[in-house]
Image: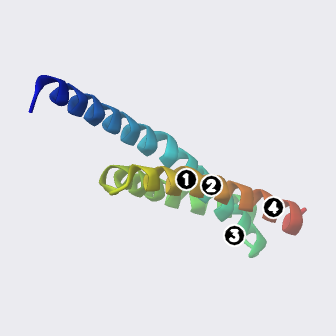
Amino acid sequence: MTPSQHMRTGAHTRLSIILRIAAALLGGYVFSWGFAALGVVVLSFAGMDFHDAEHAVMLLVFIVFLLAFLWAFIGRSLLRVWAVLAGGGAGMVAAAWVLQRSLLG
């Protein structure tokens, strides 16, 4: 391996690590936030008191964040990790917003 190839590989590896750390922290946060928002809306609609639903979901969200964080490092495709964590989280937030506006209005 030539020195220029080694530098490109090292830079690529560093960028990949930085992007995975960002996906783990930011994507995991967005996914957890979406999970919490959607969970509270669904449980409230199912008849649970808002504060009970909030507490129940917040207990689960720690595990969800941990799993999302770990998956960001073991996922094969960095693009898929970002799509699932950031896209899925944004989708859950949007679904929670729509459900809250239409069902609980």
Q: Is residue 20 left or right of residue 10?
A: right
Q: Which mark is residue 43?
A: 3
- Secondary-structure class at tag 2: helix
Q: Is residue 82 left or right of residue 57?
A: left
Comparing labels 3 and 1, the label whose residue is closer to the camera? 1
Write the residue at 20% across / 25% down: 7
Q: CA distance from mark 3 to mark 2?
A: 14 Å
Query: Which residue was labeled with disc 4?
Result: 98
Quadrant of res 34: bottom right
Task: Point out residue 96 in the picture as x, y percentages from the top left corner.
Answer: 73, 60
Comparing labels 3 and 2, the label whose residue is closer to the camera? 2
Point out the residue furthest to the bottom here.
46
- Secondary-structure class at tag 1: helix
Quadrant of res 5: top left
Q: CA distance from mark 1 to mark 2?
A: 5 Å
Task: Point out residue 50 in the picture as x, y percentages from the top left corner.
Answer: 74, 61
Q: Which mark is residue 31?
A: 1
Q: Which mark is residue 34?
A: 2
Q: CA distance from mark 3 to mark 4?
A: 15 Å
Amino acid beneath label 4: Val
Amino acid beneath label 2: Gly
Amino acid beneath label 3: Leu
Task: Point out residue 81 in the picture as x, y percentages from the top left corner.
Answer: 44, 53
Point out the residue furthest to the left here.
1
Q: Earlier in the sequence, mark 4 or mark 2?
A: 2
Location of the C terminus (image quadrant): bottom right
- Secondary-structure class at tag 4: helix
Is the residue under label 2 in contact with that under label 1 (CB below 8 Å)? yes
- Secondary-structure class at tag 3: helix
